[in-house]
Image (cartoon, rainbow, N blue to C red):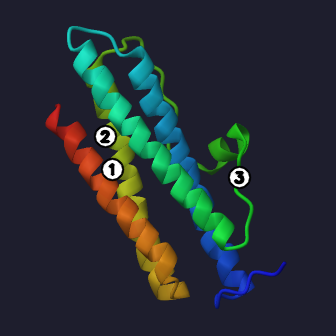
Amino acid sequence: METNIGISDNDRQDIATELFKMLADEFVLYTKTLNAYWNAEGADFYNKHQFFQNQYMQSYKFIDSVATRIRSLGHYVPATLASLLNLTQLTEITREKNDSHGFIKELLSDHESIIIQLREDIHRITNDFQDEATSSLLASLLREHEEMAWFLRAHL
C-alpha cells in the first residue's frame, strides 16, 4: 500500500537515505559498546562493565527508533551487517589492549561524530523537507548522545 503522510515520494526517499546512514552509525556504535562491555579488563572492570552495559542498552533503543521511523516513511530498513558497514561514517578499530580508558576515548569520539552529524541532519530535514517528526526524533537522539558523551568524558 502506498505511503501517504504528506511528504512527497522523493522527499521521503531523501529522508530515509539520511536515516539509513544514522541507523548504520547507531548500529556500529552499539556493537563497539558491546565490545567494550564484553572485553574491558583492568582494576576498574566491574564498574566499567556496568557502565558499558547501561550505554549499550540505551544505544539499542536508538537503533529501534531510527528503524521504526524508516518504516513509517514507507521504506525498508537496511538490516545486513554489510549494508550497515557500507553506510556508516564510523570505523571499527581494534586495539592491542582492552582497557576501559581506550574504549571510553574511542566511544566518546564516535558519539561526538554522531552529534555533529545529527545537528546537520536536523537542520537539513527541518529546512529542506519540513519533516517535524523526523527532526523531533533526531533532536531526542542528539540530547541522548550529548548526555552519553558527557558521561564518557567524565571518566577521562
Residue 54, image x, y percentages: 34, 35
Within 10 Å of disc 2 (Cα), the crowding (few <14, some 14-19, many 20+) is many
Amino acid found under the numbered disc labelled 1: Glu
Label 3 crowd (10 A; few <14 / some 14-19 / many >=20): some
Which residue is situated farthest in the right direction here? Answer: 1
Q: CA distance from mark 2 to mark 3?
A: 25 Å
- Provide the residue designation for mark 1: 112
Position in image of residue 92 (x %, y %):
52, 32
Coordinates of residue 132 in the picture (x, y in percent): 47, 82
Kindly identify the residue that appears in the image at 55 percent across and 53 percent down: 64
Residue corresponding to mark 2: 108
Q: Taking the image as drawn, is residue 56 in sight?
A: yes
> Could you say whether the residue bearing mark 2 is in a helix, strand or loop?
helix
Q: Are marks 3 and 1 in contact (CB under 8 Å)?
A: no
- Alpha carbon distance from label 3 to label 1: 23 Å
Mark 3 residue type: Pro
* Whether residue 102 is visible: no
Identify which amino acid the numbered label 2 is placed on: Leu
Q: On the rendered image, what quadrant is the C terminus found in?
A: top left
Residue 87 point in image, percent of width and height: 63, 51
- Indicate the secondary structure of the residue bearing disc 3: loop
SS at badge 1: helix
Residue 6 is left or right of residue 106, and the answer is right
Alpha-carbon neighbours of circle 1 within 10 Å: few (<14), some, or many (≥20)?
some
Mark 2 and mark 1 in contact (Cβ < 8 Å)?
Answer: yes
**What number is the disc on residue 78?**
3
**Dividing the picture into quarters, in which one does residue 106 lie?**
top left
- Quadrant where the N terminus lies? bottom right
